[in-house]
Image (cartoon, rainbow, N blue to C red):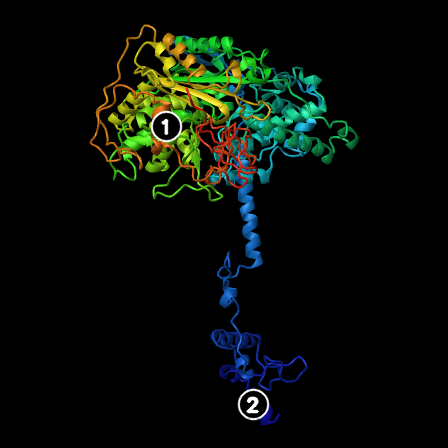
Amino acid sequence: MSEHRRKPSQSRGRRAAQPPSGGRRAASPHGGAAPSSHGMPSDRPQGGRAEARRTAQRAAGGRRRTAHGSTAADTGRGRARSAPPGRKRVIDYPRAGKHGWRRWTPSWKLVSGLSVAFLGMLVGLVGLALYMVEVPSEANAAALQQNNVYYWSDGTVMARVGDTNRQNVEIADIPQSMQNAVIAAENATFWEDPGFDVVGIGRAVVNMATGGSTQSGSTITQQFVKNTYLSQDQTITRKAKELFISIKVNTDMEKEDILQGYLNTSYYGRNAYGIQAAAQAYFEKDAAELDPAESALLATVLKGADLYDPAGGVGPNSSPKENRERAMERWEWILDRQVEVGLMSQTERDKYTEFPEPAPRKAQAGLTGQTGYLVDIAAAEVKKTLGIDKPTFDKGGYQIHTTFDKKKTAAMVKSVSVVEKEYIDAEKRPDTDKFVQFGAASVEPGTGKIVALYGGPGFDKGHFTNNANTLGVPVGSVWKPFVLAAAMEHGTYKSEGVGVSPSSEYNGDNKLKIKKQDGTDYLDKEGNPFYQVNNADKDHGYITLRRAMEVSANTPFVQLGMDVGMDKVKATAAAAGIEEDSFDPNLNPSFALGTSTPGAIEMANSYATFSASGTKVDTYSVTKVEHNGEEQPGFEKPAKETSIDANIANNITDVLRGVIEKGHGTGEDAKALGRPAAGKTGTTDENKSAWWVGYTPQLSTAVTMFRTDPDQGTLLSMKGVGGFESIHGGELPTEVWTAYMKDALKGEPKENFPKAKPIGKKIDQSGAPSSTPSQSEEPESTPSETESEEEKEEEPSRQPETSRPPTTTPPTGPENTCRPGDWLCEDNGGTEGGSEGSGETEGGSEGTGETEGGTEGTGDTNGNANSGNGGFPGGNWGGDDGG
């Protein structure tokens, strides 16, 4: 061969280019030169097998030595290659061999692998939980429901409530229509599902964890498990137990048995637990006799009887009218839903177009007369204090000791009954005496104990609204003491913070312009001055605030309220004990005349603050609660608070004593009590409510009288009731109060009120005959005499301004809306009273008395024009208060 062919290839490394030792060339299979490592023939001498192995090993070693650079062959070709990968990781993350964002992006293999591992772990945990959670061997206490026992203040039993109103029935005795209605409404996949709803459970858990709504999202199986084996607590732990027990129950029990248990343990309202009790409570028949329309209604009330029972419920937005509308809508939906899910044919559905009328609610055994109202007040306090719901409370086992005095309660019932029997005759005067109602409450000053109340005829008579605790009956002139107390504390804009003496004089004439603190006219929505009227259009001339209280003149207190500031009047009323949801939100002139709507309990307690020399104590009705023999926390006596200066409170008492004792006051009939007492009358616009709130040092009692339209829940005028031209607070309410207080205080010593010390300065209204402030004065010991007509005629400065006729539109105020729980609230864009009032009201504008409604299409709570905004019934409730 030529030297050219013996020359090594340029692509080989130095060691590979050297001839093998021994000087022998390996023989080619073809008899020629042995091929090189790249397939090129070699002209080196052939060697043995050992030499061939060594040659191969040296070639491989050369490549290994260039593993971090390039092999000899690669170098020869001028290309660089990566070394072969090393040992692989179990989880290739961050990813080897990748750069930039790709290095941190998981591969699909990694994602799928981790997902499989997580699911496997989850399945394992679920399996472990299923293994560990056992279905309880016995049902919980729901199947062993007890009574709740209520005690009078003397320790005797007042009522036993909660007899187990449950009769379990077999699935065969539950009509298919009831089964279908519940399944369609609650759990359409009941017959096929595994006993739980993953989506519903997840939603419920998230809501509970984030503090949102505690909706259950539960299947029928889960609800059966909760009712039968678990508590009603809305917690994640309880929800988890419910889920795992439901899975086991669904495996171990037949679906028919689960449905039977659910229908027998559910709460339907009206104290009915189970379908049989519900059928009796709503339709007075056995469950087996229910038709599809009735079944759909019972499935409706399962969603919440307080909001879906057509007879009404407890709490805000649960009037019969609202409940009926909700119930009809859901009833129709349940029937349509059965068609949608294949549980009823359309032909069958078309037969049921008339809403089934449930039977009237009946009182529970033991809840007759006033007992129902007493139990209602005490039960609400227990549930609120313990933080439990009605179904939990109704399972029983509670012993509830109350503040209610048996003898005083009987005396209150008797006093109302005597007055009703003597004056109210619905058969003789159906147009006026029908629907007349009384409410009353008696509170112990200095302790807050509610010792007696009158809530109405009784649950057993079909009257389920507690008239002692209504929110919707305006109080009228019983509000005036708060105006005077605010003036005593804060003074007026003229007094530079110095309190006003009750001997201060204000113009008490009729039809006066009301002035703002800057001296300008208070204007209504139309820009016209607002004129205030008095009862019977009576002129009183310039009159002391003490005398204005005694005769209940309106104009002085409306102007005084403006001079003090209605916000301060509101603060004083709150300090006395009026709750926020009772206030009229419109702080316009009529606010001074009692457009707010606290119930009798609140009014009695606020006057008890005056009786106790400014010491306020929140009312309470429960002294001790035991559950299964164990005393429950939270029922300590409420704390005392000095919320009104003692001398201010005592001066208010001194003024209010004149309403009774001084011969010319609107409450002089209360003198028959025969012991020191103080109080105030209140009668509202169009004579729609009348009040008397009075007190002694031992007892404060409020009596209200009103008339309602049972269909609309609105107030009606009491003109003509009992044969009277109109009903005033100083008449029938005062008569009830006096008769009750005589019996309630029988045997109690006569006590005097603390003596009032001089207070404030004589700060007269601008224009008074003597407007120079004087030093503080002693409380008056005798009333000012009633001025004669001649005296008034001789004093022209006391006549009202007549430069223009009174406006027909009362003053504007903030937009009014009905407050929660105000069951007498209207929102109809109109007002009754206010403009064109009779002149017999303590508020509103001058007029003829021929209309109820103010300016058409307008009105607020005071009868004030508000451009179509709805108002409370009665328009300007500052009302007709004349004694």
What residue type is disc 1 on? Glu
Q: Is residue 65 left or right of residue 713?
A: left
750 vs 323: above or below: above
User: Residue extending furthest right?
Assistant: 347
- Which residue in the protein does label 2 denote? 7
- Report x, y in % for residue 200: 58, 38
| Of pointers 1 and 2, the one earlier in the residue sequence | 2
- Report x, y in % for residue 36: 59, 81
- Which residue in the protein does label 1 denote? 793
Question: Could you classify mark 2 by the number of other residues whose Cα lies within 10 Å: few (under 14), some (14-19), or many (20 or more)?
Answer: few
Question: Do tag 1 and tag 2 residues touch (Cβ < 8 Å)?
Answer: no
For the residues labelled 1 and 2, the Cα–Cα distance comes to 150 Å
- Report x, y in % for residue 368: 51, 11
Q: Secondary structure at mark 2?
A: loop
Q: Quadrant of residue 77?
A: bottom right
Please indicate, yes or no, whether residue 53 appears anywhere in the rendered image: yes
206 vs 717: above or below: below
Q: Is residue 630 left or right of residue 190?
A: left
- Report x, y in % for residue 544: 30, 27
Q: Quadrant of residue 6?
A: bottom right
